[in-house]
Image (spheres, rainbow, N blue to C red):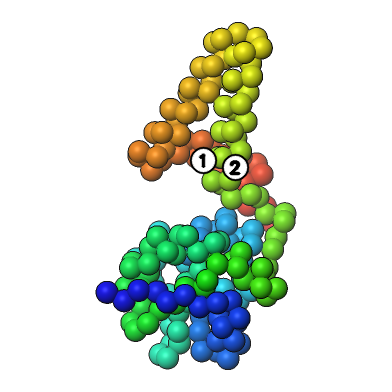
C-alpha cells in the first residue's frame, strides 16, 4: 500500500507555482471557509470516496488539513484515491502559514463547529461546577449532562450540540 510522502511547504509552493501539483484540503467546508491555502481545492474527507478529485494526467496530489494530523490518520485511505505517489503538506495549513506563504483568511466566517462545541461544552461544564459549589449542588447536573452528551457523541458519531449550533443565526449563510 502506498503511503503519503511529506513535503515541506516551500517544496509544495514550488510545485503549485509550476503547475505540477494540486493541493487538496480535506477539512470540512466551515474550516476551509475560515482559513485555507490560496489555490487549494476543498474536498472534505467524508466526500472523497464518492467523488475523488478529478485531475489531469501528470498532476501530483498533495493533501492537507489544518495541522497534518487528520491527513496522517487517513494516510492509507488518501493514498488509495490517487494513482501513483501522493503527498501530504508537512504541518498542514498551519505549517504553510508559519513558513510565511499566503493563506486566505476570513475572520468574519464563523468559528468551526467543533471549536464552537468545545467552547460551549467548556463554558457549560465550568458553569455547572461553579454554580454547584456556589449556589446549589443540583447545578452539578449540568456538568454531568454535558459530559454524557460528549460521551454519546464520541460513541455514536452524532453530536447534538453541533446540530444545535449549526442552526444558530451566526452559522447560517448570509442572504444575498
- Residue that carries the numbered disc 2 in the rendered image: 116
x, y percent for residue 173: 63, 52
Indicate which disc residue 162 carries.
1
Secondary structure of the residue carrying tag 2 is helix
Indicate which disc, 2 or 1, sits on the residue closer to the N terminus: 2
Residue at 63 percent across and 23 percent down: it is 127
**Quadrant location of residue 117?**
top right
**Quadrant location of residue 152?**
top left
Residue 75 in view here: yes
Dot 1 crowding, Cα within 10 Å, few <14, some 14–19, many 20+: some
Furthest residue in direction left, as rendered: 1
Dot 2 crowding, Cα within 10 Å, few <14, some 14–19, many 20+: some
x, y percent for residue 169: 65, 41
Are discs 2 and 1 less than 8 Å apart at CB? yes
Secondary structure of the residue carrying tag 1 is helix
Q: Is residue 163 above or below residue 50?
A: above
What quarter of the picture does the N terminus occupy? bottom left
151 relative to 119 in the view: left or right? left
Amino acid at each position: 500500500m502506498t503511503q503519503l510522502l511529506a513535503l515541506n511547504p516551500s517544496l509544495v509552493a514550488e510545485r503549485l507555482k509550476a503547475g505540477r501539483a494540486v493541493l487538496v484540503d480535506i477539512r470540512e467546508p466551515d474550516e476551509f471557509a475560515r482559513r485555507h491555502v490560496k489555490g487549494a481545492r476543498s474536498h472534505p474527507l467524508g466526500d472523497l470516496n464518492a467523488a475523488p478529485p478529478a485531475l489531469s494526467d501528470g498532476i501530483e496530489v498533495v493533501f492537507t488539513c489544518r495541522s497534518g494530523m487528520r491527513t496522517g490518520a487517513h494516510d492509507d485511505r488518501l493514498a488509495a484515491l490517487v494513482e501513483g505517489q501522493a503527498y501530504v503538506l508537512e504541518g498542514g495549513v498551519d505549517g504553510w502559514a508559519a513558513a510565511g506563504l499566503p493563506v486566505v483568511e476570513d475572520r468574519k466566517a464563523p468559528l468551526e463547529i467543533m471549536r464552537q462545541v468545545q467552547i460551549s461544552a467548556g463554558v457549560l461544564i465550568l458553569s455547572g461546577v461553579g454554580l454547584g459549589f456556589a449556589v446549589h449542588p443540583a447545578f452539578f447536573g449540568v456538568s454531568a449532562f454535558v459530559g454524557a452528551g460528549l460521551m454519546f457523541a464520541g460513541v455514536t458519531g452524532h453530536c447534538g450540540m453541533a446540530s444545535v449550533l449549526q442552526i444558530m443565526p451566526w452559522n447560517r449563510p448570509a442572504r444575498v
